[in-house]
Amino acid sequence: MRIDIITAVPGILDGVLNHSIVKRAQDKGLAEIVVHNLHEFGIGKYRQIDDYPFGGGAGMVLMAEPISRCIEQLKSERHYDEVIYLTPDGETFRQPIANRLSLAGNLMLLCGHYKGIDQRIRDLYITKEISVGDYVLTGGELAAAIVIDSVVRLLPGVLGNEESALSDTFQDQLLAPQVYTRPEHFQGLSVPEVLLSGDHEKIAAWRLEQSHERTLKLRPDLLSGTSEQL
């Protein structure tokens, strides 16, 4: 998989792309992630990428021309399964979306900044708009990092145990059960005996029961059918 990221502030992504699972995926050659600095496509001597909004109002807007230049260059080099804009008014990002995106060959992510991007870019180029929640960030870089991390970890061969991603919270519309590790006893609390039994059928049944109970208590909406299904 290749992911191209267009951003006005590329430094924000350094930590996410160069550590942990995402770095491992790149080191293994399973994911290629390329960051494009929008300023390199800016207008004039000072590489301008933003301007005041028509009609007045506070804040700045990312201009259409620099973004168009970058997108057109990238699209001339390869086909993209999705051109994604990270925006508060996009579709809420959920596990089923991550699952579908993990099957793509090439993705392009556009990070908004300031008051957003010129609407004509959304009309002309964007195929999918994603929000990571009902709140506003300074820019789309942190949202892009969330999408990248959740998608890349699903790629075959990235995780040491392929079963790990399949048992994650939300994969089956249930929250994951509680987990324990050594020591067996800690500050008066003990690991449930069933997990020490060695009986894999009983352990699986216990975990499923706990998932249902935790979901009913903490996220009943997942059981009511209101969340997006696979």
Image (tube, rainbow, N blue to C red):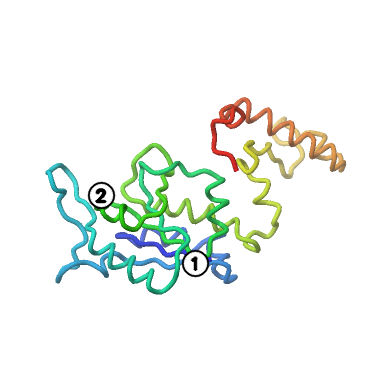
Looking at the image, which residue is at 71% across and 41% down? 180
Q: Position of residue 82 (x, y in %)?
A: 45, 58
In terms of depth relative to the viewer, which is nearer, 97 or 20? 97
Locate residue 103 relative to residue 4 in the image: left or right.
right
Q: Which label's residue is closer to the chain start, 1 or 2?
A: 1
Label 1 vs label 2, nearer the camera: 1
How many other residues sit within 10 Å of disc 1, few (<14), some (14-19) or many (≥20)?
some
- Going by the numbered disc 2, the residue's amino acid type is Tyr
Q: Which residue lies furthest to the bottom in this view?
A: 77
- Above or below, 201 relative to 63: above
- Going by the numbered disc 1, the residue's amino acid type is Arg
Q: Which residue lies furthest to the front in this view?
A: 124
Looking at the image, which residue is at 74% across and 35% down? 208
In terms of depth relative to the viewer, which is nearer, 205 or 171? 171
Q: Where is residue 159 in the image (x, y as percent from the top left)?
A: 64, 59
- Above or below, 59 relative to 205: below
- Above or below, 144 relative to 56: below
Looking at the image, which residue is at 35% across and 67% down? 36
Secondary element at tag 2:
loop
> Are the residues tagged 1 and 2 within 8 Å (C-beta)?
no
How many other residues sit within 10 Å of disc 2, few (<14), some (14-19) or many (≥20)?
some
Please name the residue that numbered disc 1 is placed on.
2
Please name the residue that numbered disc 2 is placed on.
114
Quadrant of the frame with the C terminus:
top right
Q: Where is residue 75 in the image (x, y as percent from the top left)?
A: 38, 69
Secondary element at tag 1:
strand
Locate residue 170 relative to residue 181 in the image: left or right.
left
